[in-house]
Amino acid sequence: MDQDTFPEDLADALVGVQRLIRRRVRAELPDARLRGAEVELLRLVAARPGIRISDAAKELYLAGNSVSTLVNQLAKDGWLVRETDPDDRRAALLRPTPAAEARLGDWRRRRAELVRNKVSRLDEADKDALRAALPALRRLADTLREEDA
Protein backbone atom coordinates (compact mmCIF):
# COMPACT_ATOMS: atom_id res chain seq x y z
CA MET A 1 0.00 0.00 0.00
CA ASP A 2 1.31 3.40 -1.01
CA GLN A 3 2.00 5.69 2.00
CA ASP A 4 0.87 8.71 -0.04
CA THR A 5 -2.60 7.25 -0.62
CA PHE A 6 -2.99 5.45 2.74
CA PRO A 7 -5.10 8.16 4.45
CA GLU A 8 -7.49 8.35 1.50
CA ASP A 9 -7.59 4.55 1.13
CA LEU A 10 -8.36 4.17 4.84
CA ALA A 11 -11.10 6.81 4.76
CA ASP A 12 -12.65 5.23 1.66
CA ALA A 13 -12.61 1.76 3.23
CA LEU A 14 -14.19 2.99 6.47
CA VAL A 15 -16.91 4.95 4.66
CA GLY A 16 -17.59 2.03 2.33
CA VAL A 17 -17.97 -0.47 5.17
CA GLN A 18 -20.22 1.90 7.14
CA ARG A 19 -22.40 2.65 4.11
CA LEU A 20 -22.85 -1.03 3.26
CA ILE A 21 -23.70 -1.96 6.84
CA ARG A 22 -26.22 0.89 7.05
CA ARG A 23 -27.86 -0.07 3.73
CA ARG A 24 -28.12 -3.76 4.57
CA VAL A 25 -29.56 -3.16 8.04
CA ARG A 26 -32.01 -0.49 6.81
CA ALA A 27 -33.31 -2.86 4.14
CA GLU A 28 -34.29 -5.36 6.85
CA LEU A 29 -36.03 -2.90 9.19
CA PRO A 30 -39.83 -3.15 9.13
CA ASP A 31 -40.64 0.50 9.94
CA ALA A 32 -40.28 3.57 7.80
CA ARG A 33 -36.66 4.47 7.19
CA LEU A 34 -35.02 7.19 9.20
CA ARG A 35 -32.46 9.47 7.59
CA GLY A 36 -28.83 9.26 8.69
CA ALA A 37 -28.95 12.45 10.77
CA GLU A 38 -32.14 11.27 12.48
CA VAL A 39 -30.52 7.97 13.44
CA GLU A 40 -27.40 9.76 14.70
CA LEU A 41 -29.51 12.03 16.87
CA LEU A 42 -31.58 9.13 18.21
CA ARG A 43 -28.43 7.18 19.04
CA LEU A 44 -26.96 10.19 20.84
CA VAL A 45 -30.14 10.83 22.84
CA ALA A 46 -30.38 7.15 23.79
CA ALA A 47 -26.76 7.21 24.96
CA ARG A 48 -27.23 10.51 26.83
CA PRO A 49 -30.89 10.86 27.87
CA GLY A 50 -31.66 14.40 28.96
CA ILE A 51 -29.16 15.98 26.57
CA ARG A 52 -29.95 19.55 25.53
CA ILE A 53 -30.55 20.38 21.89
CA SER A 54 -27.57 22.75 21.90
CA ASP A 55 -25.28 20.02 23.28
CA ALA A 56 -26.59 17.53 20.72
CA ALA A 57 -25.86 20.03 17.96
CA LYS A 58 -22.27 20.44 19.17
CA GLU A 59 -21.80 16.69 19.51
CA LEU A 60 -23.12 16.03 16.00
CA TYR A 61 -21.39 19.06 14.44
CA LEU A 62 -24.71 20.41 13.20
CA ALA A 63 -26.33 23.82 13.45
CA GLY A 64 -28.75 24.23 16.35
CA ASN A 65 -31.66 24.99 14.03
CA SER A 66 -30.92 21.80 12.05
CA VAL A 67 -31.09 19.73 15.23
CA SER A 68 -34.29 21.53 16.27
CA THR A 69 -35.83 20.56 12.93
CA LEU A 70 -34.75 16.94 13.44
CA VAL A 71 -36.12 16.98 17.00
CA ASN A 72 -39.48 18.33 15.84
CA GLN A 73 -39.80 15.61 13.20
CA LEU A 74 -38.66 12.80 15.51
CA ALA A 75 -40.99 13.99 18.28
CA LYS A 76 -43.91 14.20 15.81
CA ASP A 77 -43.15 10.64 14.67
CA GLY A 78 -43.02 9.33 18.25
CA TRP A 79 -39.27 8.70 18.54
CA LEU A 80 -38.28 11.54 20.91
CA VAL A 81 -39.75 13.32 23.90
CA ARG A 82 -38.87 16.97 24.33
CA GLU A 83 -39.02 18.25 27.93
CA THR A 84 -38.48 21.71 29.33
CA ASP A 85 -35.18 21.97 31.23
CA PRO A 86 -36.09 22.77 34.87
CA ASP A 87 -32.81 24.71 35.25
CA ASP A 88 -33.38 26.83 32.14
CA ARG A 89 -36.96 27.02 30.93
CA ARG A 90 -35.77 28.25 27.51
CA ALA A 91 -33.89 25.00 26.86
CA ALA A 92 -35.25 21.55 26.01
CA LEU A 93 -34.04 18.17 27.24
CA LEU A 94 -34.34 15.19 24.92
CA ARG A 95 -35.28 11.64 25.81
CA PRO A 96 -35.88 8.62 23.58
CA THR A 97 -39.32 7.02 23.62
CA PRO A 98 -39.64 3.30 24.37
CA ALA A 99 -40.33 2.82 20.64
CA ALA A 100 -37.02 4.52 19.80
CA GLU A 101 -35.12 2.41 22.32
CA ALA A 102 -36.68 -0.75 20.90
CA ARG A 103 -35.84 0.28 17.33
CA LEU A 104 -32.25 1.14 18.24
CA GLY A 105 -31.89 -2.17 20.06
CA ASP A 106 -33.23 -4.02 17.03
CA TRP A 107 -30.90 -2.04 14.76
CA ARG A 108 -27.87 -2.88 16.96
CA ARG A 109 -28.78 -6.59 17.01
CA ARG A 110 -29.22 -6.69 13.24
CA ARG A 111 -25.97 -4.80 12.67
CA ALA A 112 -24.01 -7.11 14.98
CA GLU A 113 -25.48 -10.20 13.31
CA LEU A 114 -24.65 -8.88 9.84
CA VAL A 115 -21.06 -8.07 10.76
CA ARG A 116 -20.65 -11.34 12.71
CA ASN A 117 -21.86 -13.29 9.68
CA LYS A 118 -19.56 -11.48 7.23
CA VAL A 119 -16.50 -11.59 9.52
CA SER A 120 -17.03 -15.33 10.01
CA ARG A 121 -16.39 -15.77 6.28
CA LEU A 122 -12.93 -14.21 6.50
CA ASP A 123 -9.80 -16.23 7.09
CA GLU A 124 -8.12 -16.13 10.50
CA ALA A 125 -5.38 -13.75 9.34
CA ASP A 126 -7.98 -11.17 8.28
CA LYS A 127 -9.94 -11.62 11.53
CA ASP A 128 -6.74 -11.13 13.52
CA ALA A 129 -5.85 -8.03 11.49
CA LEU A 130 -9.29 -6.51 12.14
CA ARG A 131 -9.05 -7.26 15.89
CA ALA A 132 -5.57 -5.74 16.02
CA ALA A 133 -6.76 -2.61 14.18
CA LEU A 134 -9.61 -1.82 16.60
CA PRO A 135 -7.52 0.04 19.23
CA ALA A 136 -5.85 2.18 16.56
CA LEU A 137 -9.22 2.96 14.94
CA ARG A 138 -10.64 4.00 18.31
CA ARG A 139 -7.64 6.26 18.93
CA LEU A 140 -8.10 7.75 15.45
CA ALA A 141 -11.75 8.50 16.29
CA ASP A 142 -10.69 10.08 19.59
CA THR A 143 -8.13 12.24 17.79
CA LEU A 144 -10.71 13.39 15.25
CA ARG A 145 -13.12 14.20 18.08
CA GLU A 146 -10.46 16.13 20.06
CA GLU A 147 -9.47 18.31 17.12
CA ASP A 148 -13.05 19.43 16.60
CA ALA A 149 -13.72 20.14 20.27
Image (cartoon, rainbow, N blue to C red):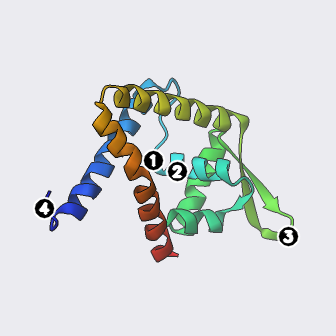
Mark 3, residues whose alpha carbon is within 10 Å: few (<14), some, or many (≥20)?
few
Above or below residue 119? Residue 92 is below
Q: Secondary structure at mark 1?
A: helix
* N-terminal-most mark, 3 or 2: 2
Mark 4, residues whose alpha carbon is within 10 Å: few (<14), some, or many (≥20)?
few
The residue pinned by badge 3 equals: 87
Residue found 50% across the figure and 73% down from its top? 146
* Labelled pair 4, 3 in contact (Cβ < 8 Å): no
Residue 40 numbered mark, or none: 2
Q: Position of residue 50 (x, y in %)?
A: 75, 56
Q: Secondary structure at mark 3?
A: loop
* Labelled pair 1, 2 in contact (Cβ < 8 Å): yes
Mark 2, residues whose alpha carbon is within 10 Å: few (<14), some, or many (≥20)?
some
The residue pinned by badge 1 equals: 36
The residue pinned by badge 4 equals: 2
Q: CA distance from mark 3 to mark 2?
A: 26 Å
Is 20 or 131 nearer to us in this picture?
131
* N-terminal-most mark, 2 or 4: 4
